[in-house]
Structures are given as structure tokens and as C-alpha cells.
Amino acid sequence: MRIPPNAPPNTPPVLKETPSQTAGPYVHIGLRPSVAGFAGYTWEPDHQIANPADKSRRIRISGTVFDGTGAPVKDALIEAWQADANGHYPHPEDGRPVMPGFRGFGRAAADLESGEWHFDTIRPGPVPGPGGTLQAPHVSLWIVARGINIGLHTRLYFPEDAALHATDPLLAIIPDPRRRETLIATREKDGEGVTYRFDIHIQGEYETVFLDI
């Protein structure tokens, strides 16, 4: 503890700032213990966000987190939050009913070989925004890994909702169209379901827009 030089009388001492900490090698033990080799947990968040029995609206979101050199971040861990197909959140502050079996939250660890991660879910609906605005359908993502001191927040939007993107209050504050594009997923395939690709770039030419939350 110290008192700043030339401080007025009775100034309380200031605690010295401690060194910053990264997520370290223990992030998976706390957030995805099964990935770290710990078994026996009765419930653990995983990549299933919506009811697996609901086949009509199923989508998969997949991607890779890349560092500033373009290398996959193979120990990344990603959390996802989203509304259901009606734009309702399973949260007391929302209060509206949600679709059966919809959890609205998931946690995925990157594959240790490829760095690939994925979520199985449904397409969210638009949700209310500030001041009576409407937010385009999106999934909120949080990324953490060794070397990241503070978790990174971003959003994934869907390419089919371009009309709503034009009035989305968050996208509206990003002036550069090229930067806004880093938040738009790519639709890859149909078949049994639709897959959306959303790669996250920590730094570099294609750096993803991150949110100060």
C-alpha cells in the first residue's frame, strides 16, 4: 500500500496493482471439467443449446479461433448465449415462455488437434433493443484461452437477415462495412440441417469486432 506523492492530508492509501493473470491452463478444469479429464459431474454446460429432439429448426454453428499469426488457438473455450426462435430468453428478466428444452446457453471447447468448435442449436428470432429498437437475430459469444487476460465478447449474425442488419443498433455503431462483415456468419450447407461458419480472429487483417462489455 502507498500514498500518492503530493496527496492531500488524510488521503487513503492506494493498493498496488498486482500483475495481470491469463486464463492459464486451468480454464477447462473450471468451465469444462470433462474436457480436462475430470469425470463425475452431474451437469456440465456443453455445445447443446436447444432441444436435440427439435429437428425442424436445427442448425450448427462451427468455427475456429485464430491468433494474430493465423494459427488456430487450440485451447480456446467459447460460451454462447441466445434467444429462442421467438426471440425469448430463458431468463427471469425476460419472463416470456421459451420453447421446450431450450437452454439458451452453451459452452464448447476447441478440438485440441484442429482448433474447431461447434454449437448445436436453433436459429434465434429478433429481440427487443434499447429505446424500442429491434435487434437482428444473433448469438452472443465469449472467448477465453491462455494468453487472453480478459475474455473477449463478440456477436454472430446470420447472413439471411440483411434487412434487419441495416437497423440493428449494435451494427449501426460500426462505421466500416468491412468491420461489420466480421460479425456475419457464412452459411455452408443444407441437408440434415444448416451449418453456419463463424471464424474468430483475435488480431490481424481480419480481426473480429469485439465488444466492450
Image (cartoon, rainbow, N blue to C red):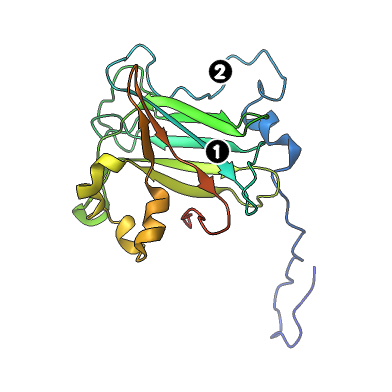
Q: Could you tell me residue 115's position as x and y percent?
A: 61, 34
Q: Is residue 147 left or right of residue 104?
A: right
Viewer-side label of 2, 1: 1
**197 vs 152, nearest the viewer:** 197
* Residue labelled with disc 1: 64
**At numbered mark 2, what does the secondary structure look like: helix, strand or loop?**
loop
Residue at 31% of width from left, 17% of height from top?
100
Specify the quadrant of the image occupied by residue 198. Answer: top left
Q: Residue furthest bottom?
A: 6
Q: CA distance from mark 2 to mark 1?
A: 25 Å
The mark that comes first in sequence, 2 or 1, is: 2
Residue at 25% of width from left, 35% of height from top?
125
Label 2 is placed on what type of residue? Trp
Specify the quadrant of the image occupied by residue 116. Answer: top right
Label 1 is placed on what type of residue? Thr
* Residue labelled with disc 2: 43
